[in-house]
Image: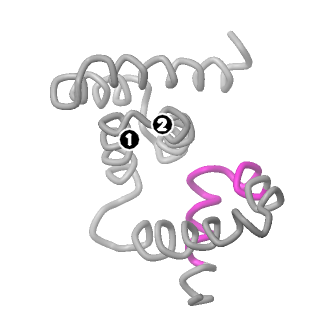
Amino acid sequence: MDKKRYKEGMAVRKAVLGAEYVDKSLREADEFTRPMQELVTEYCWGEIWTRPGLDRRTRSFLNLAMLTALNRPHEIKLHVRGALNNGLTKDELMEVFLQSAIYCGVPAALDAMRVAKEVFAEMDGGR
């Protein structure tokens, strides 16, 4: 493992997803899941998210569109929070999902919007 890349990745991962979420993921990692946590931190966050070519807002836009295309609700939920942390607005998120509906399919975009609404409700204290 490249410790510098891992450390940089951990800083970005916590900034985007929230330290509480990341710390919980690491705390709950076991012998089976720890290697995946390390891989994701080092390569996804340390190698890709730290590159200068795109800012974090743009990366969030891309991630949400791709995750919608892949129909990955758990990851969408996580990255909706990250997108909000990266400064995207609810209106911008709505536009990502509307755009995704055309290119990825309406059912996938509807699921993504449902997940986003759940995140909004959780973040607004259930209101």
Does 32 sit left or right of 86 as displayed? right
Q: Where is residue 116 shown, x and y percent of the image?
A: 50, 24
Disc 2 to disc 1, C-alpha distance: 6 Å
Q: Left or right of 49: which side holds 24?
A: right
Q: Amino acid at mark 2?
A: Ile
Above or below, 34 relative to 62 = below
Q: Does 10 appear above or below 85?
A: below
Q: Are marks 2 and 1 in contact (CB under 8 Å)?
A: yes
> Where does label 1 land, which residue?
67
Residue 54 in picture, x, y percent from top left: 30, 62
Q: Which residues are magenta?
A: 8-23
Q: Looking at the image, which residue is at 56% across and 90% down? A: 2
Name the residue that disc number 2 marks.
76
Mark 1: few/some/many CA within 10 Å (<14, 14-19, 20+): many
Q: First in sequence: mark 2 or mark 1?
A: 1
Which quadrant is home to the N terminus?
Answer: bottom right
The magenta stretch spans residue 127:
no
- The secondary structure type at the circle numbered 2 is helix
